[in-house]
Image (tube, coloured by chain):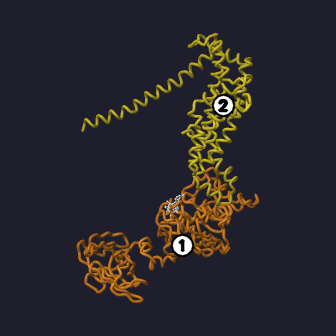
Chain colours: A yellow, B orange
């Protein structure tokens, strides 16, 4: 009897212990690099050495004159903006169609839409480039956006489908029975109730597009450089400390956006 | 107030793939009538409501309002009001916005909407809650709002799908009275779906008892209770004792049955059952009396259990041949002595009319 009690005590204690350790490791690996970059970006020296010897805002100020970097950032924002818009429209429409239908081909369509998440994006980017050439075009911004949409739609699709599955179908029935049209039901009942899900998907899609490398690598034309690729080249060629400043800026902006999203819509709840 | 619209279901059959959910439903509901669909889970009650409201189209048959077929009309053009079991209030709208929704959908003029909403909310005593969100209301309050929302657009037919299922017992009674009052006041033709027999008996003008997709009987509550058409109806509505036996003689009104216990019992005859038929006799617990001495037309047994249930006592009596019956005896005065366990008693039906025979299955 006492033996068994001991075992269960040990189990009761070891499980939280193991999870505690794993969580700590995960947090350390997630947060440590972020913190290192953030701290390094405030260095006052010419090198990316960590820890920095002195602190300053000089590299952030240097960004004000970094024309090329600014152009790359602007390109990335524009691409991410359009990608998000298109992903939301297409993803929401697809999610609604898929949630309504009980057809078996829906599974196939779902798997197809989701495949960019598992398919190596590099392979997809390369294939897309070949395809664009095949149909007689050269890479340009619209194609870049299109490529991004394909890899970003799954985020919107997932969160919207999750939100729709939470949506009580009797609400829609109630709306119709009160005489509402499909459109009225959609924009007065469905949309407000799945809005947060769509919003969460849009946020993820935006971030995924903004820091996408593999697709941009193939589909961006020579003149439109996007930020992540530009940063990579800067690091590779001259260990530019301004890249740390840009990274720091992105980290800070993302954090602020996440806090806002969490406050407004409970972002993390939508992602579960 | 208007007279209410007449609703007619004609030969409605619905299949989900191979599975027949409802079959050959014929039902005529008069204007202003409230009819209860009563039946066990899965017997097709909700399916019928979904057909009437247009959410599914039946495989066969017709739905008619005031003699006009409505099968071609989509749900939003049928003018059918539904109150759902979970009320289905729009969670992101206030009570006022919920009630106004249907009016906006039906393109009421702006300046007429607010007075109508107020009128409806007063009707269900919810006027002071107009600016609340549904999650800030109790179950009964939510249901009142759901009713107001539904009645605001003046539907031709009101469908209530297990509307009281989520309420506790006292509140349920209040809401039943309230709904019945509104239904009367509006004279609106109503179908009430329930699997609670008391609810059906107390609220409905007529009850349609359903089993496995078919209607077994449509009658007034008293008729359903006293003259059930089938054994299923008899067993489903109220409780009853079933004792197998064989018909020994039968004329137009009465018949005699030899029970498995060896005793014979007089019962109301049923057309189509002749001498020699295997039957079951059904007698409700409250239609029997316990006596000490033998009387003609009774069953002898010993008291197996005594359950004092407040206003009456429920006895379980063990007859011969493994049959047991329940007899409920009213308590006339406080301090009445109960019968002892093991005591031999005679259970006699109060009236021949209380003994029903059904073909044994
Ligand atoms: N969409 C569907 N596809 C297949 N079968 C269905 C579908 N909807 C209902 N059924 C079946 O039809 C039968 C009747 O269902 P219905 O919902 O009408 O029952 P009910 O009488 O309302 O039961 P309850 O009291 O449990 O609500 C059930 O056996 C159910 O499994
Ligand atoms: Mg049902």
**Distance from Cα at disc 2 to Cα at disc 1:** 67 Å
- To the question of a shared chain for discs 2 and 1, the answer is no
Instruction: Examine the rendered structure and indicate whether residue B115 appears above or below residue A59.
Output: below
Residue positioned 25% across, 73% down in the render: B340
Q: Chain of mark 1?
A: B
- Mark number, residue A128: 2
The quarter holding residue A260 reads: top right
Instruction: Determine the secondary structure under disc 2.
Output: helix
Instruction: Measuring from the top left, give residue B247's x and y in whole percent.
Output: 34, 83
> Number of callouts in the render?
2
The quarter holding residue B113 reads: bottom right
Residue B260 or A199: which is nearer the viewer? B260
Q: Residues within 10 Å of mark 2 (few under 14, many from 20)?
A: many
Mark 2 or 1: in front is 2
Instruction: Determine the secondary structure under disc 1.
Output: loop
Q: Residues within 10 Å of mark 1 (few under 14, many from 20)?
A: many
Instruction: Examine the rendered structure and indicate whether residue B22 appears above or below residue B280.
Output: above
Question: Which quadrant, please, contains the C terminus of chain B?
Answer: bottom left
Q: Is residue A163 left or right of residue B273?
A: right
Asked if disc 2 is less than 8 Å from ligand 1, the answer is no
Residue positioned 34% across, 34% down in the render: A11
Instruction: Measuring from the top left, give residue B354's x and y in whole percent.
Output: 39, 81
Q: Chain of mark 2?
A: A
Instruction: Measuring from the top left, give residue B263's x and y in whole percent.
Output: 28, 82
Asked whether the beta carbons under mark 2 and mark 1 sit within 8 Å of each other, the answer is no
Residue B126 or A115: which is nearer the viewer? A115
Residue positioned 58% across, 34% down in the render: A117
Instruction: Measuring from the top left, give residue A73's x and y in whole percent.
Output: 70, 24
Task: Residue B1: tell me if it is visible.
Answer: no
* Mark 1 lies on residue: B204
Residue positioned 37% across, 77% down in the render: B282
Residue B105 or B66: which is nearer the viewer? B66
């Amino acid at each position: 009897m006492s033996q068994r009690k001991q075992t269960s005590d040990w189990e009761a204690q070891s499980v939280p212990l193991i999870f505690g350790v794993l969580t700590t490791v995960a947090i350390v690996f997630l947060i440590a690099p972020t913190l290192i970059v953030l701290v390094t970006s405030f260095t006052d020296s010419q090198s990316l050495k960590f820890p920095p010897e002195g602190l300053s805002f000089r590299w952030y100020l240097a960004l004000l004159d970094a024309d090329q970097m600014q152009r790359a950032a602007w390109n990335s924002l524009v691409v991410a903006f359009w990608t998000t818009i298109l992903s939301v429209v297409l993803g929401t429409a697809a999610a609604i169609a898929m949630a309504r239908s009980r057809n078996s081909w829906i599974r196939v369509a779902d798997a197809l839409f989701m495949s960019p998440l598992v398919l190596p994006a590099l392979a997809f980017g390369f294939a897309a480039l070949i395809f664009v050439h095949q149909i007689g075009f050269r890479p340009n911004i619209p194609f870049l956006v299109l490529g991004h949409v394909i890899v970003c739609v799954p985020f919107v699709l997932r969160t919207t489908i999750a939100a729709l599955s939470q949506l009580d179908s009797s609400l829609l029935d109630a709306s119709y029975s009160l005489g509402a049209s499909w459109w009225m039901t959609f924009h007065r009942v469905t949309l407000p109730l799945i809005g947060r899900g769509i919003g969460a998907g849009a946020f993820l899609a935006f971030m995924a597009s903004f820091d996408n490398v593999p697709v941009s690598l193939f589909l961006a034309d020579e003149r439109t450089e996007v930020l992540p690729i530009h940063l990579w080249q800067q690091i590779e060629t001259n260990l530019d400390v301004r890249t740390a400043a840009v990274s720091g800026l992105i980290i800070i902006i993302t954090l602020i956006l996440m806090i806002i999203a969490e406050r407004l819509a409970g972002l993390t709840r939508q992602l579960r | 107030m208007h007279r209410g619209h007449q609703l007619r279901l004609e030969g409605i059959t619905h299949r989900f793939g191979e599975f027949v959910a409802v079959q050959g439903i014929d039902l005529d509901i008069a204007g202003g009538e409230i009819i209860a669909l009563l039946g066990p889970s899965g017997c097709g009650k909700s399916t019928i409501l979904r057909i009437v409201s247009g959410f599914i189209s039946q495989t066969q048959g017709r739905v008619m309002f005031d003699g006009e077929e409505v099968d071609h009309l989509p749900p939003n053009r049928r003018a059918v009001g539904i109150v759902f079991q979970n009320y289905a209030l729009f969670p992101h709208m206030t009570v006022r916005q919920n009630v106004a929704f249907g009016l906006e959908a039906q393109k009421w003029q702006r300046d007429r909407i607010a007075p109508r909403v107020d009128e409806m909310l007063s009707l269900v005593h919810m006027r002071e809650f107009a600016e609340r969100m549904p999650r800030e209301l109790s179950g009964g309050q939510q249901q009142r709002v759901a009713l107001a929302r539904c009645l605001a657009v003046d539907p031709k037919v009101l469908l209530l799908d297990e509307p009281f299922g989520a309420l506790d017992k006292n509140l349920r009674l209040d809401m039943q009275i309230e709904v019945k009052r509104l239904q009367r006041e509006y004279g609106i033709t109503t179908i009430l779906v329930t699997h609670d027999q008391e609810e059906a008996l107390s609220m409905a003008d007529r009850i349609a008892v359903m089993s496995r997709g078919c209607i077994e009987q449509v009658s007034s509550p008293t008729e359903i209770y006293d003259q059930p058409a089938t054994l299923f109806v008899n067993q489903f509505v109220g409780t009853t004792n079933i004792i197998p036996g064989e018909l020994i003689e039968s004329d137009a009104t009465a018949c005699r049955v030899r029970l498995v216990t060896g005793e014979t019992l007089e019962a109301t005859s049923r057309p189509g059952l002749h001498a020699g038929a295997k039957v079951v006799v059904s007698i409700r617990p409250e239609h029997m009396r316990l006596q000490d001495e033998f009387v003609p037309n009774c069953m002898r047994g010993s008291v197996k259990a005594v359950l004092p249930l407040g206003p009456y006592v429920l006895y379980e009596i063990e007859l011969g041949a493994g049959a047991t019956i329940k007899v409920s005896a009213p308590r006339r005065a406080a301090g009445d002595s109960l019968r002892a366990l093991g005591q031999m008693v005679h259970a006699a039906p109060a009236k021949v009319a209380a003994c029903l025979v059904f073909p044994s299955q």
